[in-house]
């Protein structure tokens, strides 16, 4: 059994440190985007953040399986309890300087994402689960070792006649639009990366459907924050439980939502 107090502190600290490394690249005066060059700032930011987080987690929790986007060898592992990392989620947002890219770290236990942290360094938002599993958004200056004010997160009670739906900025398609059109939508909002989960978790949106390919490192941290705020995540096709530790850590389509939303079959 992991020490969740320690896990919370370690994940938060590593996310903040990785965010600082990413922002150095992001803010560098000679920021240049080269599509597939190994020296591209995006790749450099990814790799630096990944090395920092991976080393920190392996040192703190050597007995736990570690899966990370940047280390292909880790994707061949089979596990239902593991730590999982996406050091820079939202590459398109990073490249286009839109700001809402995130650092994602999560702990999955028996197929469920029970703890996680989502940090968006460019826009100064930090979401995570506490040791008891409840989710908070931290406000303030984000001191590495001393958490500031922690605002409890809770999904809102949805009004099915006037829903707010959040969808991807970079991955919208006709199928997603057709699905959303089946709801009574009052407001549409978009966000990059795993911030979409956090918008539902903090009551800024009711529904986030994803009809596209994602990997478990894209969703696990945001999903943990959502569940810790009382939200739910289900498979798109049959509304069954959305689990982790799938072959190759690949996701199917899903729906993240506030309980009370009447899901369309």
Image: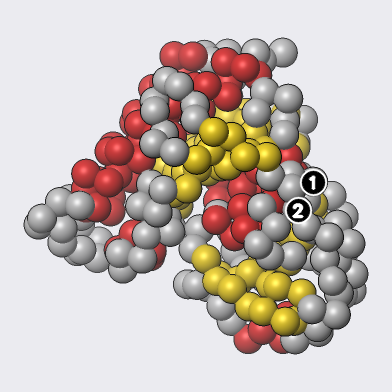
Q: Are marks 1 and 2 in contact (CB under 8 Å)?
A: yes
Q: Quadrant of the C terminus?
A: bottom right
Numbered badge on residue 155? 2
Q: Indicate the position of residue 104 as horizontal and vertical percent values.
A: 50, 42
Q: Which residue is mark 1?
A: 230
Q: Indicate the position of residue 229 as horizontal and vertical percent values.
A: 74, 44
Residue 237's quadrant in the figure? bottom right
Q: Quadrant of the N terminus?
A: top right
Q: Residue at x 75, y 86 (%)?
A: 181
Q: Residue at x 59, y 34 (%)?
A: 150
Q: Residue at x 84, y 71 (%)?
A: 159
User: In the image shown, does 77 or 226 lie closer to the viewer?
Assistant: 226
Mark found first going from the N terminus, 1 or 2:
2
Q: As drawn, is 2 to the left or to the right of 168?
A: right
Q: As drawn, is 104 to the left or to the right of 239?
A: left
Numbered badge on residue 92? none
Q: Indicate the position of residue 36 as horizontal and vertical percent values.
A: 25, 61
Q: Secondary structure at mark 1?
A: loop
In the picture shown, does residue 77 fall above or below 230?
Answer: above
User: In the image shown, does 138 or 249 lie closer to the viewer?
Assistant: 138
């Amino acid at each position: 059994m992991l020490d969740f107090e320690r896990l919370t502190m370690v994940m938060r600290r590593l996310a903040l440190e990785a965010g600082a490394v990413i922002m150095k690249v992001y803010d560098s005066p000679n920021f240049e985007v080269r599509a597939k060059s190994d020296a591209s700032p995006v790749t450099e930011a990814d790799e630096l953040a990944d090395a920092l987080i991976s080393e920190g987690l392996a040192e703190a929790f050597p007995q736990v399986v570690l899966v990370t986007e940047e280390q292909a060898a880790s994707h061949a592992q089979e596990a239902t309890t593991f730590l999982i990392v996406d050091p820079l989620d939202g590459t398109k947002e990073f490249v286009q300087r839109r700001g809402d890219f995130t650092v994602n770290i999560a702990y999955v236990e028996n197929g469920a994402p029970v703890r996680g942290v989502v940090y968006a360094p460019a826009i100064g938002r930090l979401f995570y689960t506490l040791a008891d599993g409840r989710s908070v958004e931290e406000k303030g200056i984000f001191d590495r070792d001393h958490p500031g004010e922690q605002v409890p997160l809770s999904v809102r009670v949805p009004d099915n006649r006037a829903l707010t739906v959040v969808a991807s900025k970079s991955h919208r398609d006709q199928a997603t639009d057709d699905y959303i059109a089946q709801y009574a939508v009052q407001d549409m909002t978009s966000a990059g990366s795993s911030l979409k989960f956090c918008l539902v978790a903090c009551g800024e949106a009711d529904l986030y459907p994803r009809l596209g390919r994602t990997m478990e490192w894209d969703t696990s941290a945001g999903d943990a924050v959502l569940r810790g705020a009382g939200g739910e995540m289900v498979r798109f096709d049959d509304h069954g439980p959305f689990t982790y530790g799938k072959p190759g850590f690949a996701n199917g389509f899903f729906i993240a939502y506030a309980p009370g939303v009447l899901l369309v079959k």
